[in-house]
Image (cartoon, rainbow, N blue to C red):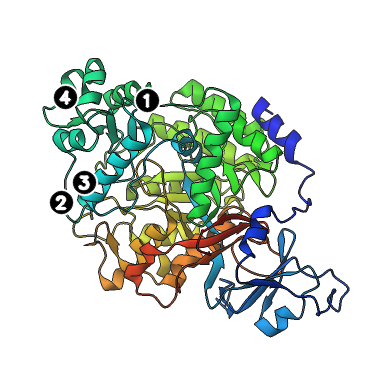
Amino acid sequence: MTDNANAVADLFWGKMNRKLHLSWLLAAVFASGCNSQTDEVVEAENGAPAPDTIFVNGKILTVDADFSIASALAVSGERIDAVGGTQEISSLAGPNTQIVDLQGRTVIPGLIDNHLHYLRGTNFAAYELRIHGVTSRAEVLRRISQRAEELGPDQWIFILGAWNEQQFEDQPGGFTREELDQAAPNNPVFIQKTYVAFFMNSLSEAILAPALGDFYTGDSVVRTSSADGRAVMYAALEYFPFAINMQERKEEVRAFNRYLTSMGITATWDAGYLDGSYDPVIELAAEDDLDLRVFYAQRYWAETSRTSIAAAELLDREAPFQRDDKFGMFGIGEHVHGFLHDTTGSANPFSDDIWDQWTLIAESAARNGWQLNEHAMQDGTSVGMLDVSERLAEQYPIADLRWTLGHVDLIKPETIHRAKDLGWNITIANHTVKPRIEGIASPPIRQIQDSGILWGLGSDGTIVATYNPFHTIWEYTAGKVFPNIVKYQADEVITPQEALIAHTRSNAYLFFMEDELGTLEAGKYADLVVLDRDYLEIPVDDIRNIKPLLTMVGGEVVFQDSGF
């Protein structure tokens, strides 16, 4: 094993059955609207201890096979004891059981993000200004001014992706130098739009002038090639206040986790590979201080014949699952080979040499039991991957490995059905800050759902998409992107029930954790989210406005809204 893999194994194997106590935060949750039951049975009829916590008078969306709805749920330690009616579940309470009266609120399973650039997000979370889903340009400028006031003069203000010029309903378009100067006259402002486009005010332009070179266009935006965009971004990030020691780095991770759990995310898979060291996450996991379940892909880089051979050899000698139920590594992706990376804007075929190198790594994955998660926007890319897997399936049980096509923006119906027949799955990302591709439903979400293939929802955050899961669900149920632009016709969207299954139960399957996560059923981990409105009854246009009031991971409250 690599040093990183050894660290994970040493820290976590053998800890699978530990029992976590409820935190002080849970006690705060019950300070209002909750009571201890002192006159009920202490133990259930089978002799089991009384639950730690019981939620009653709610609308519990279990997302089980029947999408059944209950009104109460009991939790002991990390797991769900029972789900059922309020009277039935209340009878399990003992002297120390905390009773939470949901007062009709909706509870859903914890949301699972199957494609997040997690470690990249931790690098920036403690300092960056987010404008996810903000549809008012005036509001963004107000937030920049507020941030400048909080920081004081000369301190940099960074907005790092997850927005689009179209999302502002009051005034679409990019930011001008003049309005950024007015919003923060004494602070450099750097706003990343994509990996190749950036907006800035006069102060940041003056400081970054040597890096801007010929790419400065004369207004407030710098547009570059991909390679030159990295140069501009790196020059700006020289002024980003990154952590300088392990304790500060751990606080950056905590800050990102707090944001994710406030959005209802309880588990994620990191599709990145070269975004820094996992050491602070490893330490937090060892200290039982991770607020959500974090899993990540095996990390390597393959761009040449030599590095592709090295990647294949790595998969030969490493175990494909190095994790417990809370943290660790499994799978490869989202780019098995660095140059087999397509976009919706170009359908140019890849060379035979690149496909040969991709096949070499994929065969090692198949031979050694690795899940493979791949980026495939063009239909032709998916077809090529399915061709390779069909050949490999003659020797290896690929259908058992839950290989997955990601993005699939331009996938065709026949390719969807072929992928299903070959045992592949699909993951769909957030596109709420991307314009509609005229004339087509991209990705074809209704066709994917109707095909019967197993598929899950993720974000693809942090730079190219928002990572609020309710934004993603809104996109595919309301059929719109920000601010309120129609993307799908009425017969091209999915239902809220189908979207919730994709963001919970289906993703648990893709994580090989369908027996532990994804539904609210007895015996599974108590990963759940209390919502501020009725998920099934509100108009689909209101889904993007849903706010979690409480998030629980493994029986511990990791987020609580101040009003709950």
Camera sees residue 376: yes
Q: Amino acid at mark 4?
A: Tyr
User: Disc 2, disc 1: CB below 8 Å?
Assistant: no
Distance in Å between CA atoms under marks 3 and 1 = 22 Å
Cα–Cα gap, marks 2 and 4: 24 Å
**Callout 3 crowding tier (Cα within 10 Å): few <14, some 14–19, many ≥20:** some
Q: Look at the picture and state if 133 lies above or below 158.
A: below
Q: Is residue 63 rendered to the left or right of residue 72?
A: left
Q: Rounded to the nearest whole Å, what is the CA distance between mark 3 and mark 2?
A: 9 Å
Q: Give the labeled residue for mark 1.
A: 237
Local SS, label 4:
loop
Indicate the amino acid at tag 3: Glu
Tally the marks. 4
Label 3, on which residue? 165
Question: Label 2 neighbourhood size at 10 Å, few (<14), some (14-19), many (20+)?
Answer: few
Q: Can the viewer see residue 85?
A: no
In percent of width and height, residue 485 lies at: 22, 61
Residue where numbered disc 4 is placed:
216
Residue placed farthest to the left in the image?
218
Between the residue at mark 1 and the residue at mark 4, the CA separation in whole angstroms equals 18 Å
Q: CA distance from mark 3 to mark 4?
A: 19 Å
Secondary structure found at label 2? loop
Residue 285 is situated, as x and y percent measured from the top left of the image, at: 67, 40
- First in residue order: circle 3 vs circle 2: 3
Q: Give the x, y percent position of residue 233.
A: 32, 26
Tell me the amino acid under the disc marked 1: Leu
Q: Which one is earlier in the sequence, the residue at label 3 or at label 1?
A: 3
Identified by mark 2, the residue type is Gln
Helix, strand or loop status at disc 1: helix
Dot 2 or dot 4: first in sequence order is: 2
